[in-house]
Image: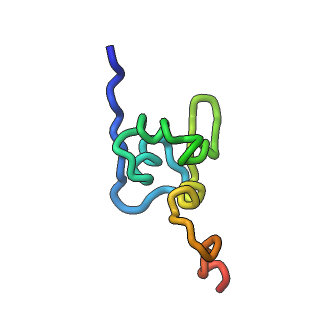
Amino acid sequence: MSRPVRPAVIPPGTWPARMPPELAAGYCGEPSVEAFLRRVGSDYPQPDVKKGRRRLWLRETLDRAIRPSSPFGPVADAARDL
């Protein structure tokens, strides 16, 4: 018996700062939680929060993983400089 595939979730409104696997998968554009979890540790980071069975990824950490690399180095947040 195969396990059901859990769909990625895209929330209405804004993305939360801390995301469980369902939201992190949707944020990264993966079709399912399982597809996202298969890439954790290689393309995506390990969860930032690990408490018991709870796993949460920070939006900021996922942003660094999915942001295209720049030949000019890391992209700075101009708003922080203001």
Nearest the eye: 54 or 57: 57
Q: Which residue is at the far top?
A: 1
Q: Is residue 48 above or below residue 81?
A: above
For the N terminus, the quadrant is top left
Image x and y of residue 18, in percent: 54, 51
The structure residue drawn at horizontal position 49% and vertical position 56%, both measured from the top left corner, is 16
Q: Position of residue 62 (x, y in %)?
A: 54, 55
Residue in the image at 50% along x and 48% along y: 19
Name the residue: 54% across, 60% down: 63
User: Between residues 66 and 49, which one lies in front from this camera angle?
Assistant: 66
Left or right side of 11 for 47: right
Colour convention of the picture: rainbow
Front residue of this view, candidates 62 and 38: 38
Q: Residue at x 35, y 34 (%)?
A: 6
Query: Could you say where residue 25 lies in the image, as x and y percent from the top left?
Result: 43, 46
Taking the image as shown, residue 3 lies to the left or right of residue 68, namely left
**Which quarter of the rendering shows the C terminus?**
bottom right
